[in-house]
Amino acid sequence: MENSFAALRERQWVPGRVVAEDKHHYVVFSPHGALTGRVAGRLLHSAKTPAELPKVGDWVALTPYPREEKALIHQVLPRQTVLSRKLPGRETAEQVLVANVALAFVVQSADERFNPRLLERYLLMITEGGIRPVVALNKCDLCASPDELAAQAAAAAPAAPVLMVSAKTGRGIRQLAQLIRPRETVVFIGPSGVGKSSLINRLYGEEIAATAEVRESDLKGRHTTAWRELIVLPNGGLVIDTPGMREFHLWTRAASLRDAFPEIVELETACKFTRCSHTAEKNCAVLAAVAQGRLSPERHQSFLKLKRELEYLEKAGRVRRRKDGGRPGDYLASHPAE
């Protein structure tokens, strides 16, 4: 990051890091302390998509006005990692959730709301963004069969550690904390009501992130985290808390699917046809594994569903590039982190 910023010092700009975002207003940590930042007009008008504007976790170049506790943000420095999703709704556009994080804790409840298919979605985007994933199953004190649930999570996340934790009792919090290194940034992500903020409070040692009870009627939590913000833990680690997300649409390339389903990638090498769709072909090794019980039908159907969704996104990206003349910032353009 220092190399990226060296060329900008000649303009008398200083480095800062975005720690909170509310529309086009930001809180930025800088050598002059915490400043309220706004985006310079040139950056605002040159950005081809909202994804190119500052997001929580971004390193930025800014002009500080310390007497006013304000700053003008001129440039977003290259992102080392990025976690994105497709904007909810019909629009085919990227929404950057957080940037420059090393580790992502995917939090789900260790109860009837546990959703391995949703877990697969999160892990696909996390690994695509260059981030290490960890699965945290919270509220394990309420789980009747924790070992069985952990096994389901491990099957959906073969490349990620799975931790059984409880923000209420403190179980697993020490193991969670040991994964967060000083000066390293991590993010907690997951649906509303799974206890992300409660886990952060446990790690911090006091009530710092807002929490709310889950409704008994439908087991849904309220969105107590209204925007993404960065919190500094006592050990020097940095944590980004995120709002609960009811929708998590993919925003990635189809090739990333192979990293999320390594067992299917291994199986398909034995398929008769090189472009086997794993749906109806004869001598399909993947279908054979499902029939023999070596691959769960749910895992197989999830792979096919995600594959169709990614193929649709790629098609939409090609259409947009033709309409826009191949402008940077479209779907298949490189991420800033690449």
Image (cartoon, rainbow, N blue to C red):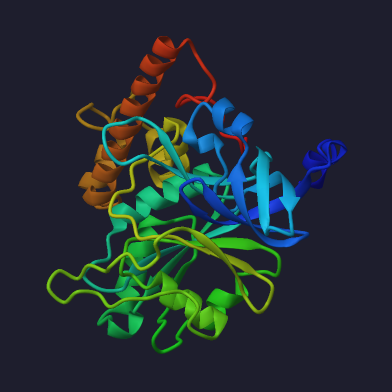
Query: Residue 118: where, in percent of width, then height?
Result: 31, 53
- Residue 3: % across, % down: 82, 42
On the image, the x and y values in percent for residue 30 come to 73, 57
Q: Can residue 274 be seen by looking at this rendering?
A: no
Measured from the top left, where is residue 28 in percent x and y? 64, 56
Instruction: Please name the residue shown 44% across and 56% down the image.
Output: 158
Question: Which part of the image, by quadrant, shows the C terminus?
Answer: top right
| Residue occupying the point 46% across, 74% down | 209
In the image: residue 9, left or right of residue 117 = right
- Please identify the quarter of the rendering in which residue 309 is found: top left
* Residue 333 showing in the rendered view: yes
Give residue 286's quadrant in the image: top left
Question: Which of these two is toward me, 133 or 271?
Answer: 133
How many numbered marks appear? 0
Residue lying farthest left?
217
The residue lying toward the viewer, choosing from 278 and 132, is 132
Above or below 130: residue 113: below
Vertical arrangement, residue 21 with respect to residue 217, above or below: above
- Residue shown at the point (29%, 28%) measured from the top left: 277
Q: Nearer the viewer, residue 155 or 166?
A: 166
> Residue reaching furthest right?
10
Q: Which of 228 and 330 is in front in this view?
A: 228
| Image height of 283 relative to 82, above or below | above
Residue at the image position 68 percent from the left and 59 percent from the top: 69
Left or right: 7 as drawn, with respect to 55: right
Q: Quick check: 273 left or right of 266? A: left
Q: Farthest residue to the bottom: give it.
A: 169
- Picture quarter containing residue 111? bottom left
Image side of residue 266 versus residue 248, left or right: right
Q: In this view, does 146 lie above or below 98?
A: below
